[in-house]
Structure formats: structure tokens, C-alpha cells
Image (cartoon, rainbow, N blue to C red):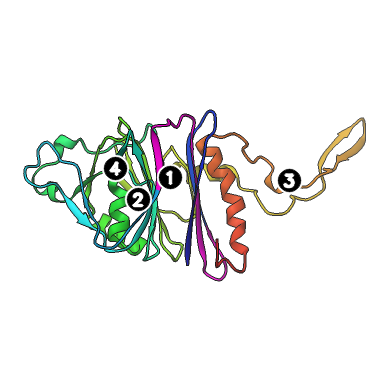
Amino acid sequence: MLGFAILVTLLTMSDSCQEIRIKAKDGGVVLGRSMEFSDLRDYVNNYVVTEPSGTKHEAPRLPNCPGDPFTFSNRFKTITYKGTFRGEWLNTTADGINDAGLSASVLYFTDYAEYIDPSDIMGTACANSVPQTMVTTYILATYQTVEQVRSDLESGTFPAVWAGYDLGYVPPLHYNIIDKTGAGLVLEHVKGQGVKWYDNTVGVITNSPPYPWHMDNLRNYPRFQRNDNGREGFKYSSLGDDYSLAPQWTGSGLLGLPGDYTSPSRFVKLLPFFHWLQHLPLLTTL
């Protein structure tokens, strides 16, 4: 079973988000994510939207694609999180899950995201391309498992992704995809590198930089553990005498845990707590 929860929080100086996956010993999987904006305008409204299988979706028209725009239909029932902007529905599906147990989410990928210029989509690509704002919609409509998404990415049959506008600008996004087994995939369109995808083995994602950078950064925190790192304390010698300042508190297993709200620090901060929750014996309900 896969459960899904969304928390929208307003913080004073933040345009951030994070998502975590928890998998218990009984195989239950729960996803949770937060979405924080420092300035959420009152003309942006958010809704949970349900769609039956067969629901048709139409991509925006492209300048060098004559004829009808690219369309696709839901193979599955979906529950998604969408919004309106000045009374008009946005293209972006921020989060969602389908009845096959596949979830997909967008998170900001500022300064690193790069998509195909809409004017460069032409010819056969017209029949298989979506803006970055519709990638989660397409994934939830089309796939049952992470492996199916990976297969289409590897074969080149996944749609080309072009730069689309929403909220009056081109949102820089990357994507986290999780199926009911807990398997995860991070999909990124990286400036100067093209389309990249990675197994999300840690079950955590935040924002920029790219996912491999976050994973390398974890090497800077090799000693995090659930229990205290011993009780011997700081030892030193002075004027021929030996001293030891033993700690008078617990929590040394997380000594050095970042406390700020940057994307790299949030990635590191989330990982140990939710990794240790995997030890829960049962996780059958939210």
C-alpha cells in the first residue's frame, strides 16, 4: 500500500520543498512532502483534483507543429494537486498518485533546470512532447511502476520536454517518482547536460543542486547514528594532568546535523530521521 500526504506551509523567506518516503517492515509505503512559498498570492488557489481513467489531456500548441496538439489519456484513475491562477487552471500538476500506486511530484530546481526551446520542437517530435509543467500529469496517466518510466527514458520513447509557462514564467522543476514497492526515480533536465535520471535510493529529495551532488554531499556526514557516539567526551592534558569532559546530554549521534534551511541542509537533515523510521514494523495507514 502506498499513502500520500501534502503539506503546504508558508514561511517568510522560503521557496522550498522536500519529499520523503517511508517504508515499513510490512511493506507499507508512505510519502510525505511539504511545499513552502514566501509569497503565495491570493489569486493563486489550490485544489485536490480527481480524474477517472480515460480523461483526456491536451498539451499547448507549439509554433512549429501544425495540426492538432499532442494529446494523451489517463490509463488510470488519479488524484492530483493542482491550482488556478487568476481564475484559469494551471498546467502544472504539483503532485499526484494513480490507482496503480505510482506517485509523481515536482520540486523547484532553480538555476539548474533547462528544457527544449518550444520552437525547436518540430516534425515527429510534435506527436510526443509536453511542457515541463505536464510531466507529472503524463507520468500518472501512463505508468504503473518506476521501472516502466525508466524503460521509456532509456529507449527514448518518453516525451520530449519543452519549456512551458505557468504563473507567468517558466517554472524550473525536477521530479520524484515513487511506486507502491517504494522504488524511486529522480528525473532532471539539467542545464548543459540534458535529461538525467537516477534511482532515488535514499527516499529523500529537496531542491537544487542536482541529485548526484546531494548524494556526494552525504559523504561529509559519515558518523550519523541513532545512538550516542560514546560517552568519553573531550580529552586533554594540562601541566601533567589528564582531563576528560564527558557530555552531559544525549544526541551526539547527530552531532553536526545542519540547522539551516538551504536545500543541501534540508536533504541531510531529513535523511537520518526518516531512514530510521524504516524500522517500524507496521505502516498500513497514514
Mark 3 falls on what kind of element?
helix
Q: Is residue 272 left or right of residue 208?
A: right
In the image, which is nearer the foreground, mark 2 or mark 4? 4
Q: Which residue is mark 1?
A: 211
Q: Earlier in the sequence, mark 1 or mark 2?
A: 2
* Pointer 4 local density, CA inside 10 Å: few below 14, some 14–19, many at least 20: many
How many marks on residues? 4
Q: Mark 4 vs mark 1: which is more N-terminal? A: 4
Q: CA distance from mark 3 to mark 1?
A: 28 Å
**Label 4 close to label 1 by CB (< 8 Å):** no
Q: Residues within 10 Å of mark 3 (few under 14, many from 20)?
A: some
Identify the residue shown where x is 47% and y is 43%: 206
Q: Residues within 10 Å of mark 2 (few under 14, many from 20)?
A: some
* Residue type pointed to by label 3: Ser
Which of the two marks, 4 or 1, is nearer to us in this view? Answer: 4
Q: Amino acid at mark 2?
A: Trp
Q: Residue 205 or 232: which is nearer the viewer?
A: 205
Q: Please report whichever mark, 4 or 3, sits nearer to the chain's N-terminal start.
A: 4
Q: CA distance from mark 4 to mark 3?
A: 46 Å
Residue bearing the label numbered 2: 197
The CA span between labels 1 and 2 is 9 Å
What number is the disc on residue 252? 3
Q: The magenta stretch spans which residues?
A: 22-47
Residue depicted at 20% across the width and 55% down the height: 72
- Residue annotated with mark 4: 91
Q: Quadrant of residue 64?
A: top left
Alpha carbon separation for disc pair 3 and 2: 35 Å
From the viewer's perspective, tell me whether residue 277 is left or right of residue 49: right
Kind of residue at disc 1:
Tyr
Q: At 22% across and 46% down in the image, what residue appears?
A: 130
Instruction: Indicate left or right for 247 with 40 as reference.
Output: right
